[in-house]
Amino acid sequence: MQKLLLPWGQLIEPEKWIFVIGCYSSGTTLLKKIISNHPQIGGLSLEGVSLTDALPRPEEFGWTRLWYKCIDEIRLEPGPGMEKRAARAKKHWSLWFPKDVPNLVEKSVANTARTPFLQEYFPPAYFIYIIRDGYAAAGGIREKADPGRWNNPNYEDEYPIELCAKQWLASDEIVQQDRKNLDRFLQIYYEDLTENTEETVSRITNFLGISDFPRKILQGKWNIHEKHEEINNMNERSFGRLTGEDVEKIRAVAGERLERHGYRPPDEGKLKRAD
């Protein structure tokens, strides 16, 4: 289908390419939806990697929601042939992006692993990195992943929590490594976005150099993963799906970096009781 649609696409050149990056289950969808509701910004209805064959997806290699397990295939670096690959993605996306806005936002979680490629071939590229408590994010990855659907060679029902924690760790490691060479980069926290929404969104509009969001947009309800709710911090709900053993395994994998971001293990009273 994408090959058939390619001749109808165009090489779009927005004023700004805005890329939302972050780990799975970290608020990237919420953030992208908020940003795309700004009157000067348009977004895609799906992750961009689903609408082009130019950018590899971890699902192609059987590792849904765990791109770190196929990093060599996911990671793209500037080099020979990469400009054509980027042009192919732009042509595909041009068929789905709104035509009446100057700036475009794209959210594909796997893009977290290839920001140098995006900066080189999607100028001017603006990166907004959202971090969420890794205990909650790891639990969310385990809950939402369906490895059997993608013919994973090792897991059918769910991933071990340790692998989910490693994905959170890998996401932060690669972003902190790459950010030093990114021209336009903003880091925010999921907890700030959900608890101090207007202030955090103001940081985003200042970073992008655009007008403030109309307040009524931020105070409405949002359709996120089949839920229609106001913006809320969902961490405690996620903690309730973890056992004490889960927490210890996450801590063993990513505890040092979690603490670096100010995240401590959730209180026992917030956790699921082990069977």
Image (spheres, rainbow, N blue to C red):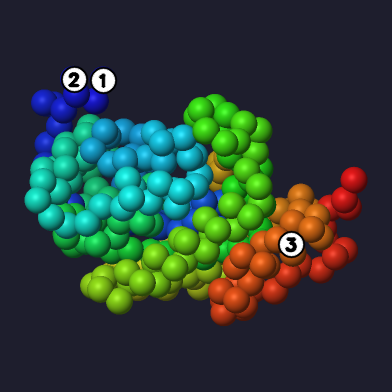
Q: Residue 244 location, x and y as percent?
A: 81, 60
Q: Which residue is mark 3?
A: 247
Instruction: Choose between 117 and 164: the one closer to the eye.
Output: 164
Q: Secondary structure at mark 2?
A: helix
Q: Nearer the viewer, mark 3 or mark 2?
A: 3
Q: Residue 247 location, x and y as percent?
A: 74, 62
Q: Residue 212 location, x and y as percent?
A: 39, 66
User: Is the residue under label 1 in contact with that under label 2 (CB below 8 Å)?
Assistant: yes
Q: Is residue 119 visible?
A: yes
What residue is drawn where x is 52% and y is 64%? 169
The three-letter code of the residue at mark 1 reads Met
Q: Nearer the viewer, mark 1 or mark 3?
A: 3
Instruction: Choose between 153 and 44: the one closer to the eye.
Output: 153
Badge 1 or badge 3: first in the primary sequence: 1
Q: Residues within 10 Å of mark 2 (few under 14, many from 20)?
A: few
Give the Cα separation between the discs numbered 2 and 1: 5 Å
Q: Is residue 92 above or below residue 275?
A: above
Badge 3 or badge 2: first in the primary sequence: 2
Q: Work out which residue is located at the far front of the displayed protein and give it.
A: 154
Instruction: Choose between 138 and 208: the one closer to the eye.
Output: 138
Q: Is residue 158 above or below residue 75?
A: above
User: Is the residue under label 3 in contact with that under label 1 (CB below 8 Å)?
Assistant: no
Instruction: Choose between 17 and 161: the one closer to the eye.
Output: 161
Q: Secondary structure at mark 3?
A: helix
Please give left or right for residue 91 compared with residue 18 in the image.
Answer: left
Q: Residues within 10 Å of mark 3 (few under 14, many from 20)?
A: many
Q: Which residue is mark 1?
A: 1
- Label number found at residue 158: none
Q: Is residue 230 visible?
A: no
Q: Residues within 10 Å of mark 1 (few under 14, many from 20)?
A: few
Q: Secondary structure at mark 1?
A: loop
